[in-house]
Amino acid sequence: MKELSSSLTLFYKFVFPLIWFAGFGFGARAVLFAPTASGSGWLQYMVLWLGVTLLIIFITGNFKKVGIQGDILIVSNFFRTEMIDVDRVESVDGTAFLNPKMVWLNMKDVTPFGRKITFWPRHRLGSGLGKHPLVAELRQEIGLKG
């Protein structure tokens, strides 16, 4: 099996949000219970903490671990693994300016993970601006037009 996802997928999906939530939460606790806390500063701190936490979960919560073996995609959300035929892929695309780069597979029909499977590809030196080289490789391998 050829692994397409970054080895850091588990970290970005589960560990980083937990570190953020706990670390910023301890900071919020310190602000809330500080003897000099006054006014509505604590409310702004709490709203920021919860807002960014929800944003992180929204962004990272949908990422999958993806591999390919022949004509089969092996997709996992770390709780369940599904085998999906590559013929079901409608298009392959990715981000151009975000880092780490993201790649997604738009499916022709609904899969157990929805119509869009998003993942972080393995890091490649020199990928710079533009889409990750894996986007073009997958399009070619699957036989899609760019």
Image: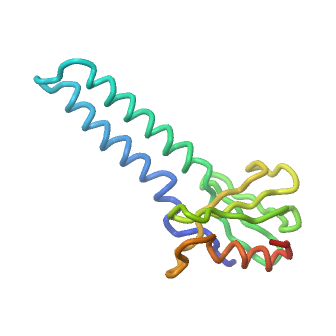
Instruction: Name the outermost residue toward the left.
Output: 35
Q: Quadrant of the C terminus?
A: bottom right
Q: Percent x, y for residue 2?
A: 67, 78
Which quarter of the rendering shows the N terminus? bottom right
Query: Which one is nearer the viewer's eye here, 104 or 8?
Result: 104
| Quadrant of the image occupied by residue 117 | bottom right
- Please give left or right for residue 108 compared with residue 34 in the image: right
- Report whether 120 appears left or right of 136: left
Q: Residue furthest bottom?
A: 126
Residue at 56% from the left image edge and 65% from the top image edge: 101
Q: Quadrant of residue 41?
A: top left
Question: Which residue: 42% across, 52% down?
Answer: 16
Q: Could you tell me which residue is drawn at 24 percent across and 31 percent down?
A: 29
Residue 54 screen position, x and y as percent:
49, 37
Residue 26 drawn above or below residue 126:
above
Q: Is residue 126 above or below residue 72?
A: below
Q: Is residue 40 left or right of residue 48?
A: left
Placement of 77 over or under 53, stated as above or below = below
Left or right? Give the position of 99 relative to 109.
Answer: left
* Vertical position of residue 115 compared to residue 133: above or below: above
